[in-house]
Image (spheres, grey):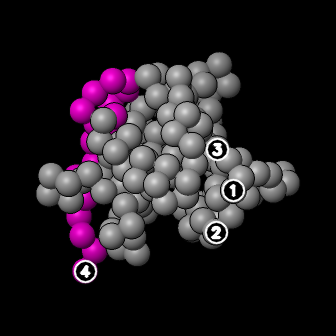
C-alpha cells in the first residue's frame, strides 16, 4: 500500500524551505558528497520549495524555478531520505508539482537535469531526454523536458 504524503509548498524563506534544506543536506551533501556551497545557492530564496510529509516528518523534496519570460519551469534538487526510497513518495511529490505547474502557473514546458540513474524514473512521468550527457558536481546528468499541452 502506498503511503499518502501531505505536500506543502512555499517560495523563499519559510519552515518548508528549512525542511527542504534538511532533506537536501542529508541526500546531496552527506550521501552524495556534494559540497554544501554547491548545493545551497542564491536561488533558494526565490524558488518554490515543495516538501512531502509523512505525518509531520519531511521525507521528500524538490524546488522549482519559474522563468515567466519563456513560460518555463525547471525542477531541481529532487531528493528523498534514504529510509523512505522505493515507496513512490517522490512520484507523489512530482505528480503534485506537475499538477501545480499545469493548473496554477502558466508554463509551456518543464525541464530538469536528471542524474543518469534516475532518467527512467523521470521518463515514467513523461519527461524526454534532450542533448548530451554532462557532469554536474562530478555526477553524470542528462537534461530532460516535458511539454505542457495548451
- The residue located at (59%, 37%) in the rendering is 38
Instruction: Work out whether mark 1 precedes mark 3 in sequence or the reverse, and give the earlier one.
Output: 3
Picture coordinates of residue 127, whole percent (x, y)? 64, 57
User: Quick one: SS at disc 1?
Assistant: strand
Q: How far separated are the C-alphas under marks 3 and 2?
A: 17 Å
What is the span of residues highlighted in magenta in the rendered image?
Answer: 1-17
Q: Nearer the viewer, mark 1 or mark 3?
A: 1
Q: Are marks 2 and 4 in contact (CB under 8 Å)?
A: no
Q: Residue at x 20, y 59 (%)?
A: 54
Q: Nearer the viewer, mark 1 or mark 4?
A: 1
Q: CA distance from mark 1 to mark 3?
A: 18 Å
Distance CA(mark 3)–CA(mark 4): 30 Å
Quarter location, residue 141: bottom right
Nearer-N-terminus badge (3/2): 3
Residue found farthest to the right: 132
Q: Earlier in the sequence, mark 3 or mark 4?
A: 4
Pointers 1 and 3 in contact (C-beta within 8 Å): no
Q: Quadrant of the N terminus?
A: bottom left
In space, the residues marked 2 and 4 are separated at their CA atoms by 25 Å
Among numbered discs 2 and 4, the one appearing first in the sequence? 4
Labels in figure, total: 4
Q: Which mark is residue 22?
A: none
Name the disc covering residue 1, or none.
4
In front of the other: label 2 or label 1? 1
Please tell me the numbered disc located at residue 111.
3
Residue 110, by quadrant, is: top right
Q: Which residue is mark 2?
A: 117
Please give the label number shown on residue 139.
1
- Is residue 16 visible in the rendered image? The answer is yes
Q: Which secondary structure lies at badge 2?
A: helix
Q: The C terminus appears in which quarter of the rendering?
A: top right
Amino acid at each position: 500500500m502506498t503511503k499518502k504524503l501531505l505536500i506543502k509548498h512555499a517560495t523563499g524563506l519559510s519552515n518548508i524551505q528549512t525542511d527542504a534544506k534538511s532533506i537536501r543536506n542529508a541526500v546531496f551533501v552527506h550521501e552524495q558528497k556534494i559540497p554544501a556551497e554547491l548545493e545551497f545557492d542564491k536561488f533558494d530564496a526565490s524558488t518554490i520549495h515543495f516538501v512531502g510529509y509523512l505525518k509531520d516528518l519531511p521525507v521528500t523534496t524538490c524546488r522549482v524555478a519559474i522563468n515567466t519570460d519563456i513560460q518555463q519551469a525547471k525542477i531541481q534538487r529532487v531528493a528523498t531520505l534514504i529510509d523512505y526510497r522505493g515507496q513512490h513518495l517522490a512520484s507523489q511529490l512530482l505528480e503534485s508539482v506537475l499538477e501545480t505547474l499545469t493548473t496554477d502557473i502558466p508554463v509551456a514546458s518543464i525541464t530538469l537535469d536528471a542524474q543518469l540513474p534516475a532518467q527512467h524514473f523521470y521518463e515514467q512521468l513523461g519527461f524526454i531526454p534532450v542533448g548530451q550527457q554532462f557532469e554536474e558536481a562530478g555526477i553524470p546528468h542528462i537534461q530532460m523536458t516535458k511539454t505542457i499541452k495548451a
